Image (spheres, rainbow, N blue to C red):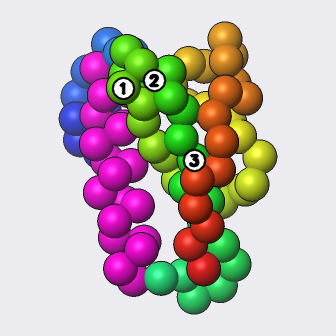
């Protein structure tokens, strides 16, 4: 998280966010969720078409990697309960 706030460069922030998301997804899978669900979302176009994941508390897609340009690009890949 400190890498995200340490730079004003949006692309660098997105790269750091992708790494943080992967760590958080791993932690959530190991720990589980006490209440509700978390959704693991994926955008195949993020990170120069390598793809990137993020975690979401809502089933609707709100892509953090492309901003308003492609807000709904992506899909739910997994549900953590």
Q: Disc 2 designates what residue?
A: 46
Disc 1 + disc 2, Cβ < 8 Å: yes
Q: Disc 3 designates what residue?
A: 41
Q: For the stretch drawn in magenta, what is the main secondary structure?
A: helix
Residue 74 seen in the current view: yes
Magenta stretch containing residue 26, yes or no? yes
Residue 3 percent location from the top left of the image:
22, 35
Cα separation between marks 1 and 2: 6 Å
The secondary element bearing badge 3 is classed as strand
Query: As drawn, is 73 to the left or to the right of 65?
Result: right
Q: Nearer the viewer, residue 35 or 25?
A: 25
Q: Nearer the viewer, mark 3 or mark 1?
A: 1
Name the residue located 29 percent from the left edge and 57 percent from the top edge: 23
Cα separation between marks 3 and 1: 14 Å
Query: As drawn, is 26 to the left or to the right of 74?
Result: left
Q: Disc 1 designates what residue?
A: 50
| Image quadrant occupied by the N terminus | top left
Q: Nearer the viewer, residue 54 or 10?
A: 54
Sequence-first disc among 3 and 1: 3
The secondary element bearing badge 1 is classed as loop
């Amino acid at each position: 998280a400190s890498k995200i706030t340490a730079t004003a460069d949006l692309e660098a922030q997105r790269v750091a966010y992708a790494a943080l998301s992967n760590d958080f997804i791993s932690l959530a899978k190991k720990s589980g969720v006490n209440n509700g669900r978390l959704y693991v979302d994926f955008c195949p176009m993020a990170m120069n078409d390598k793809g990137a994941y993020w975690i979401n508390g809502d089933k609707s897609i709100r892509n953090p990697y492309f901003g308003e340009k492609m807000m709904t690009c992506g899909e739910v890949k997994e549900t953590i309960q």
